[in-house]
Amino acid sequence: MLRRLRNPWPDHRAERLLGAVSLLVGACVIAMIVFVGVRAWPVFEHNGLSWLGPGGTLETQIANMQATSVNPPASAFRLNAWPLVYGTLLTTSIAIVLGTVIAVLSSIFIVELAPTRLRKLAIPVIRLLASVPSVVYGLIGVLVLVPFVGNHLVTASQKNSVQDFVELTGAGLGVVVVILTVMITPIMIALICEALMAAPASWREGAVALGLNPLRAVLAVTLRAIRPAIVAAAVLATARALGEAVMIQMVSGGSSYTPNFSHGALIFFYEPLRTLASAIVDYHEGLGAPALRATLYAFGALLLFSAFVLSIAGYLIKLPLRRYQVRG
Amino acid sequence: MSVYAPQLETGSPPTSKRGRRSSPWTWRWRDRLVLASAWTAGLGLCAIAAAIVLYMGYRGIEYLRPGLLFTRPAIGQSQSQTGGILDPLLGTALLTLIGIALAFPLAVTCAVWIAEYGRPRWLARVVESSIEIVAGTPDIVLALFGLSIFQLGLFAPLSFRAEGGGVYGRSFIAAGAMMSLIALPPLFAATRDGLQAVPEHMREAAFALGKTRIATIRRVLLPSVRSNIATGVTLGVSRIIGDTAIVLLLLGETLHIETQGPVPVVSLLRGTGSTLTSYVYDNSPAGEGAAPQKAYAAAFVLLVFVLGLNLLVDRIGRSRDRATGLSGVGGVV
C-alpha cells in the first residue's frame, strides 16, 4: 500500500484525486446555502415576503424574540426588516456612486497622469488602504470621526429639530458612507487600472492624432472601451459594501432608524441607521433564542442571496471584456 | 495667355500657439476640471492612507508599551490593571496557522486541477465559480455558516462545550475552518494565474522527457510558481488577521485562551480565545469595555502586521518581476 503511494502516480488517478478535492469547494458552497437556508426558513415560512416590508419597531420586535422560549409560536417570528434593508441599500448605493467616481478619476491619475515616481508611490499606498482591517477603520471612525461630527458639525438647532424622533450623536449615515467609500475605492481602482493598462494604446494615440488633447482622448476612447470593467469593479465593490459588518456596527449609531430626507438634507446624513450585516453583529449574543437565531440567519440568507446574484452579474459583465484580452 | 495657376498657399506651415505639447491651460475648462479632480482624487487617497498610518502610529507610540505585548489581559478597574495583549496575539497567530494550513492544500489543488486538467470543462467552471461565490460571500455570513455547522452533534467534539453539555459551536478549529474559506480565493487566484503564465514550452519539454502530467506538475510547474504561491499565502494571511466578524461569532471572545479537555494540542484547538481584531472591537466604545488606549495599542500592532505583509507582497512581486521581466499594477489589491 505504501509502496503504491510512493511510486509515481499514474496520471488518471492523480487527475481524479485532484478533481475530487477541488469539488470540496463546490460542496462547501452548497452546504453553506443549505445550512443558512434551513436555519432561516422558519422566518419566511411564518412571515412570507411581508417580512421585508416596513412597519413596527425593530428593537421591540427583537426584544420579544429574545423573550421567547425553546419552542416559539409563529407570532414570535414577526419582524419588519425594512429599516435594515433600507439602511443597507442606502449606504451601499451612496458609497458605490461616490466610490466609482473617485476610483475612475484616481485610476486615470495613476495610469495616465502621474509622473513615474509618483505612480510608484501611489500604487502601494492605495493597496495599503485596501488591506487595512475593517476594525481599524471602525476604531478611527468611532474615536475620531464620530466625535468630530457630533461636536463640531451637528449644530444644537439641528439636534433640537429632530429630538422627538432620534438623537444625533454624530454616528450615522455620513460617517458610514465616508469610511465605506474609502474602503471600497481601492478594490475598484485595482480592476480599473488593470483594464486601463490593457486597453490598446493605439486607440488613444489615434484619437490624439485626430486632434484631441491627451486627457480627452483617454476619456472619450479608453474609458469608453473599458466600461464593462468599470461596471464589474462596481459590482465587486457592491458585494464588499453589502457585507461590511463590523465597521458599520461601530460607527452607524446602532438604532434601526430610517434616515429621512424630509428633515433636511444635512440632518439626513447625521441620522443613525443599521444594516443587515451590522444587525447580525449587534445581536450575535442572542443567537441562543430560536426565533432571533432564525431571524439573524434570514439576514444572512438575504446577504448570501445578494452575493450570489452579484457574482452572476459580475460574470456576465466581464464576458465582453474577453474580446480584447482584458482579465477582470 | 495666362496659365491656370491656382494661388497655392505659401508661407510657413501654420504655427500653433500651444507649441508641440499641448498645455492643459489651453484645454477647455471641462477638461481642466477633470484633470484637476483626477489629481485631487489620486493624491487625496494617498493622503488618507498616510493620515491613517500616521495617526495610528502616533497613538500606538503614545499607548503601546513593550510590556503590553508580553502580559496577559486581565479584568481590572483602571487602565493599568487590565493587562496586555499577549493572548490576543497568540490567538491571531494560532488562527492564522490553522486557516492557512487548511486553505493551502485546498487552494493549490484547485488551482492545479483547473489550470492543468480542467476536464470536464463544466465541472471546472463549477469549481471556479464556487470559489468566486466564496470570495463574494460576506465574512459575517461565513461566520453564521460556521456556527450552524459546528453546532451539529457530529462536530460537537470539535468545539467548546458548556458545563450543562450545550454545544456552542465555538472553538479555534471552527473559526480556523471559516478563516480558511476567507484565505482560499486569493491563494487560489495567485496560484492559478501563476500556472497559466508558465510558458507552454516548459510543459512540452517535460513531456518530451517522458514525464507524466502529474510529475511535470510536481517537479516543474509548482517549483516555478513558488513565488506566486508565496504572494497568495501572504494575501491570505493579511485577510485572516484583519477579520473580525468570524472571530466575534466563532471564537467566543474569551479574555484568555481557554483549553478544553485533557489532550494537549486537541484541547487548544477545541478551546476558545480572542484575537487582536476582537480585542480592538471589545475595547472600543462599540464593545463593552471602553478602553480606547488599549484598543489603539492593539490596532497599532495589527496595522504594523498588515504593513509588513504589504511590504512582503511587494518584495515577492518585485523579485518575480525581475526574474520574468513582467510588471504591472496587476493585483493592486
Image (cartoon, grey):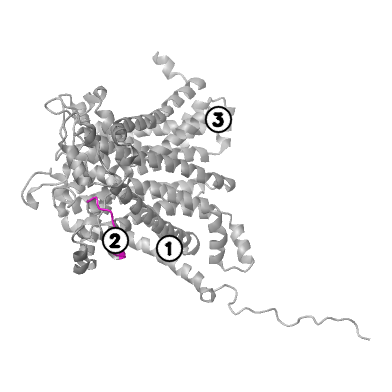
Q: Measuring from the top left, give residue B291's x and y in whole percent.
A: 14, 52
Residue type, mark 3 in image:
Ala
From the image, state whether disc 3 or disc 2 is nearer to you.
2
Most extreme residue toward the top is A1
Quick one: quadrant of the N terminus of chain A?
top left
Please say if the residues under marks 3 and 2 sit with CB atoms less than 8 Å apart.
Answer: no
Q: Nearer the viewer, residue B208 or A34?
A: A34
Q: Are marks 2 and 1 in contact (CB under 8 Å)?
A: no
Upstream in sequence: badge 2 or badge 1: 1
- Displayed quadrant of residue A67: top left
Report the residue marked by disc 3: B206
Name the chain letter of the residue that bears numbered label 1.
A
Where residue B104 appears, as percent x and y from the top left, is 37, 34
Q: Residues within 10 Å of mark 1 (few under 14, many from 20)?
A: few
Residue range highlighted in magenta = A255-265
Q: Is A216 displayed left or right of A280 in the figure?
A: right
Is disc 2 surrounded by few (<14), some (14 to 19) or many (20+) residues within 10 Å?
some
Task: Classify mark 1: helix, strand or loop.
Answer: helix
| A39 versus A278 height, above or below | above
Q: Chain of mark 3?
A: B
Position of A165 relative to B214 (above/below): below
**Which amino acid, mark 2?**
Phe
Q: Which residue is mark 1?
A: A118
- Residue B263 visible in the picture: yes
The picture quadrant where one finds residue A146 is bottom left
Nearer-the-camera pick, A164 or A306: A164
Expressed as whole percent of the image width and height from the top left, the position of residue A47 reads 30, 36
- Say what amino acid the circle numbered 1 marks: Leu
Q: What residue is rendered at 35% in x and 34% in y?
A: B103
The answer to whether dots 3 and 1 both sit on one chain is no
Compared to residue B221, the image places residue A15 above or below, namely: above
Q: Which residue is mark 2?
A: A268
